[in-house]
Amino acid sequence: MDEKNKEVRELLLKTRENLIKEIKNKARSESDDTVKNEVGDIYDLASNERDRELNLLISDRERGKLLQIEDAIKRIDEGSYGTCEECESPIPKERLLIMPFAHLCVSCQAEMEKNLTIEKEFKEEREYRKLAFTSSDEEEA
Ligand SMILES: [Zn+2]
């Protein structure tokens, strides 16, 4: 494993650990005894039943974060982590420590955000026109 990613990997593992701890704490405060007892090792178990129960305990936001963490760890293990997916230049470690889930380098990220904004504005403009058209249409009717 790349030495410089080791630190990020540890950070990710710690983040994941804290997140799972939070989820477990939340589960412990629930009154349902079955949930309380089963949540202990729930994360390590993969059966659909357990997944379903875990899914009941975690919010979309937490799930999204867990997936991002696991994706980043996977990319570290595969050796594709820390490389910009767009231009393939290395992403600086300082950036990865702040944004461990970054797939893109700073300039590609900025470029992407710019495009997203343009797309959004374009869409909003279209929605607005549609709305304006619909309301004036209704006024005439
Ligand atoms: Zn790039």
Image (cartoon, rainbow, N blue to C red):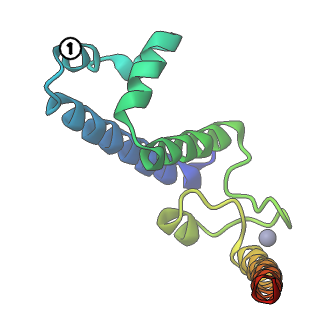
Q: Position of residue 49 (x, y in %)?
A: 46, 11
Please give the name of the residue rendered at 44% of the width and 29% of the height, measured from the top-left corner: 55
Q: Quadrant of the N terminus?
A: top right
Label 1 crowding class (10 Å Cα cut-off): few <14, some 14-19, many 20+? Answer: few
- Which secondary structure, mark 1? helix
Relative to residue 32, is residue 72 depicted above or below? below
Please give the name of the residue rendered at 72% of the width and 78% of the height, measured from the top-left corner: 113
**Dividing the picture into quarters, in which one does residue 107 lie?**
bottom right
Residue type, mark 1 in image:
Asn
Q: Position of residue 118 (x, y in %)?
A: 80, 84
**Dividing the picture into quarters, in which one does residue 141 lie?**
bottom right
Residue 1 in sight? no
List the residue tagged with mark 1. Answer: 37
Relative to residue 105, is residue 67 depicted above or below? above
Q: Depth check: 110 or 132 in front? A: 132
Q: Position of residue 115 (x, y in %)?
A: 81, 79
